[in-house]
Amino acid sequence: MGAALDRLLGWLDLGGIAVFAASGALVASRKRLDPVGFVLVAAITGFGGGTVRDLLLGRTPVFWLAAPELVGLCAAVGLAGYFAAHLIESRFRALLWADAAGLALYAVVGAEIALAAGADPWAAVLLGTVTATFGGILRDVVCQELPLILRREIYATAAAAGAAGFVALRLGLPALPREAAFAAGIALGFAIRGAAIRHGWSLPPYRARAGRDYPDAR
Amino acid sequence: MGAALDRLLGWLDLGGIAVFAASGALVASRKRLDPVGFVLVAAITGFGGGTVRDLLLGRTPVFWLAAPELVGLCAAVGLAGYFAAHLIESRFRALLWADAAGLALYAVVGAEIALAAGADPWAAVLLGTVTATFGGILRDVVCQELPLILRREIYATAAAAGAAGFVALRLGLPALPREAAFAAGIALGFAIRGAAIRHGWSLPPYRARAGRDYPDAR
Amino acid sequence: MGAALDRLLGWLDLGGIAVFAASGALVASRKRLDPVGFVLVAAITGFGGGTVRDLLLGRTPVFWLAAPELVGLCAAVGLAGYFAAHLIESRFRALLWADAAGLALYAVVGAEIALAAGADPWAAVLLGTVTATFGGILRDVVCQELPLILRREIYATAAAAGAAGFVALRLGLPALPREAAFAAGIALGFAIRGAAIRHGWSLPPYRARAGRDYPDAR
């Protein structure tokens, strides 16, 4: 990878961290956490996807251990959320959109890094999807919220589509500038997820037609 | 390890992935997820244990990033679950048995890989147990189900017994063919877990006789 | 690092494992688990923070795969909890204090190891905080308890303060013996967390003043 692409990847990573950190702060506001809790959940959400990606690929020490400016970014976003989240009219709606932006960014960044590491196209799409979704999963699991990914909306689908579009352009049209492939993949993922939020799109959920389900054994 | 053993390990891994993926699809049916949710939960469950094992041992990039056929297997099992889970009379019972098969397979595979990495026998048994149980733990945590491992049944015990039996045979009877040790360990783990399911066996749960417990502070 | 410091770090790690394992056993008693469940939750809690630390830094195989005595320690603490937790008058209070001791120990151990790995001071404080808190987070997530870290008390703050005090002493007063910096950092973290437990100290939680919150979409 050239230096320019590295810089571009760095900015995309930064953007993904910032919007996921903001989504973490919004969940922290729902949980009425203290300022430190805001910073911690912002950091877990902002760093979660990229950390899982780096661990799966063996890229250690993970990126944020060498990037104090990213630590500062997460802390600043977390504190901004603590002092300003009440100014937002609908925190759940803001969370959905911040999460959607992070999802689209990380799906493409994760797929690119997987491709660069020599992964198969299918695996790159899966890795992009997993890394795009794990920041939010960690955020929701730690905060004991029902993961956004399990709500009946097009979610992982959007991440997979963005990653797949990006991978298809990179491998199918190698003459296309990388920046264009990045932009197209991000736009595709964000458009699908955004349309799903605006119009309530969803894939048909599973419907039991026969069969006994779980006992409520808790 | 010879090529034949590698192949055998590969098949056992494949079997563990398939049955754990099926257990993931069954939990996805309980959660009424969409097809993509089925595939994602199937993949998290199918790859979870092996991924934790590889991360703990430092074997990265993790195995499935170089094995698109495994990605396809998880996707196929997940989609099959979406279209066919309603045909199963008792999904909870099917989940228990698929989970039991995955548990027995992964306990032995995890222990073998730990031994090959030079781990102490005790640590190999523990690693086998942890890797056999973490796919299911991740499945249940992500889906916000009460982990099977916390239900009052013999569960981790069966994984530990299978792994311990396998390790004992490998180290105590080095003349025994490895395939026999594999088979014995898997059979032992599956027999104990299966008997616990059929007969409702359990170890005595902890009973408070004195002492104040948690406040319900939630 | 000299051999003496390695030994000291080893003892601190051991202490952190033992008290976190005890906190795991106390949560297992709340969940009425069987003896194997006690051992498993004790091990997840005792090894969790150090395992996350090692994975983030790329120190694999993780430490406990080469340390069967630590496996034995966790098993012994878990079984002791199974047979003796009912003798403790207030298990929740005991859990708070065991967790506080683990928090203080691991914050400093994690920060030291991050410094030794060349991390930036800010990152070392964050890594100390994350590793001090992740054993407890894993314990609570696996057991489906509301994480202690989300209760409205000074928690991560204490870990961050202990780690920051330690890092400040190590870098600001290099002439100070390392043992003194360890002791000061541990004492600072434990004093803050302990005072918060005794006096009910907390940082002001976030209060919504405007804005619609989440729908209860579960």
Image: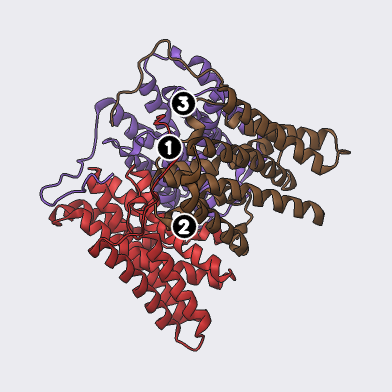
Chain colours: A purple, B red, C brown
Query: Which mark is on residue A69?
Result: none
Query: Quarter of the image holding residue A193?
Result: top left
Query: Judging from the image, what secondary structure is the residue with disc 2 in?
Result: helix
Q: Dot 3 falls on which chain?
A: A
- Labels 2, 3: front one: 3
- Please name whichever residue, B65 or A81, is drawn nearer the observer in this view of the structure: A81
Horizontal side, residue B209 vs residue C165: left or right = left
Which residue is at 40% across, 29% downward?
Answer: B218
Alpha-carbon neighbours of circle 3 within 10 Å: few (<14), some, or many (≥20)? many
User: For the residues tagged 2 and 1, is the chain the same?
Assistant: yes
Q: Which residue extends farthest top?
A: C209
Q: Is residue C44 above or below residue A100?
A: below
The percent position of residue A152, horizontal first and vertical second, equals 26, 36
Residue A9: image location, x then y, percent: 55, 39
- Going by the numbered disc 3, the residue's amino acid type is Ala
Residue B51: mark: 2
Q: Residues within 10 Å of mark 1 (few under 14, many from 20)?
A: some
**Residue designated by label 3:** A28
Q: Is residue C197 above or below residue A172?
A: above
Q: Say which of C215 and C35 sits in front.
A: C35
Q: Are marks 2 and 3 on the same chain?
A: no
Q: Amino acid at mark 1?
A: Asp
Which residue carries the number 1 mark? B213
Which circle, 2 or 1, is nearer the viewer? Answer: 1
